[in-house]
Image (tube, helix red, strand yellow):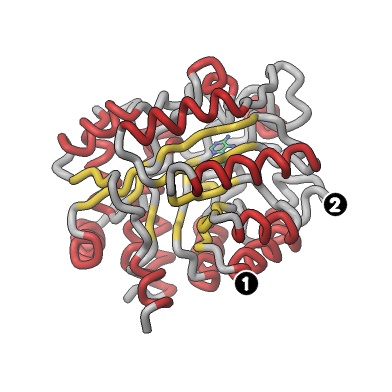
Amino acid sequence: MLSKNEILSLLKTKEIPKDLLEEAYKVRKYYSGRYVFFRALIEISNICQKACFYCGVNRENKNLKRYYINLETLKKIFEKVKNLKYTSVAIQSGEIISKKHFEFLKKIVTLAKSKYNFEITLSLGELPKKILKDLFSLGARRYLLRFEVATPKRYYLYHYKDNLHSYENRIKTLYTLKEIGYQVGTGFLVGLPFDNPLNLYKDIRLIQKLKPDMIGIGPYIPQKYTKLFNLLEKGVKILNEKDRFFLNIKLIAIFRILLKTPNIVASTALITLGTKFFPLEEVLNFAFKAGANVIMPVFTPSKEKKLYALYENKYFSEHEKFYDGTLKASFIPVLERYGNPISYYIRNFK
Ligand code: 5AD
């Protein structure tokens, strides 16, 4: 177990002690061997009502063409991933509150469950309780909603303070999701401007408090058409790319040791930064050894995929690359199982 002081001193230095990685790998191997769960990620729309200061699909970005995938396209993607033997799909979009959107969501969850029997993860922002409940009753079982920043004071450094950007509502939604019965995934951005070890420690504490079934953290990567980019232009400093990459790896190891059983994703942002310095299989090897056990190849059609521009030069996550990369990293891709986290089994089969 890691004490507060141990965690803080780990966060204050750039080195990753060998014994931290060894310990994390031991825990990882004990609970999940060398397995890596694959989820097919489909980004159904880049329309978003929010205006987060770090995010490229913020509603104020008028340079971005917006898309919304139709049912026919989605059916083709479902067929494709089914043929590749995927059993787990993740549906993501910007935050859209509209009746039409909700009806479409209900339709696609029904289709994914009744026709394909996929295990469904949703990542659609802070939707009202009623629709979250409806989607659960139609068969969705997992929900990803990063809290992004752990304390209200810091949350409003990167978000407006209004009805649409409420720290309180974000945290409340996480508890609502749990209450409905979803496996909940959450996490935060690593290496934002104004970040420091003490803040990061608070992010870790909130993860410990929420005890999520899934953890998704990713390094912050600047995007041109965002408020934060202007700050960087004015000279506000952030950690360099390599340091942000290794800080993220270190955090994965810390979470594997602290929480042991949740699924932890090797995020696209992590892979985007890592592959600037190392070949993909090395990046995956770092992430999986530190404790990550989930990866999400993207199946959004290529034209739309380019428009899901959360940040610059997003890694073009493809199934074949991730599959080969995982094997080359000496880990085992798993597609034909739902890949529930151990925490889920512990909760349900006591
Ligand atoms: N860099 C890295 N990750 C980002 N996200 C949004 N903008 C950025 C960025 N500039 C992440 C957020 C969100 C997820 C979908 O993408 O954490 O939850």
Q: CB at mark 2 closer than 8 A to ligand 1?
A: no
Q: Give the farthest residue toward the bottom.
A: 350
Quarter, ligand 1: top right
Q: Nearer the viewer, mark 2 or mark 1?
A: 1
Question: In which quadrant of the rendered view does residue 333 lie?
Answer: top left
Which residue is identified by label 1?
179
Circle 1 Cα neighbour tier, 10 Å, few/some/many (<14 / 14–19 / ≥20): few
Which residue is identified by label 2?
163
Note whether residue 234 is visible.
Answer: no
Q: Is residue 163 left or right of residue 317?
A: right
Place of residue 349 in the rendered image (x, y in percent of width and height, measured from the top left): 37, 79
Q: Give the farthest residue toward the front.
A: 115
Q: Is residue 117 left or right of residue 103?
A: left
The quarter in which the N terminus is drawn is bottom left
In the foreground, 347 or 57: 347
The kind of secondary structure element at disc 2 is loop
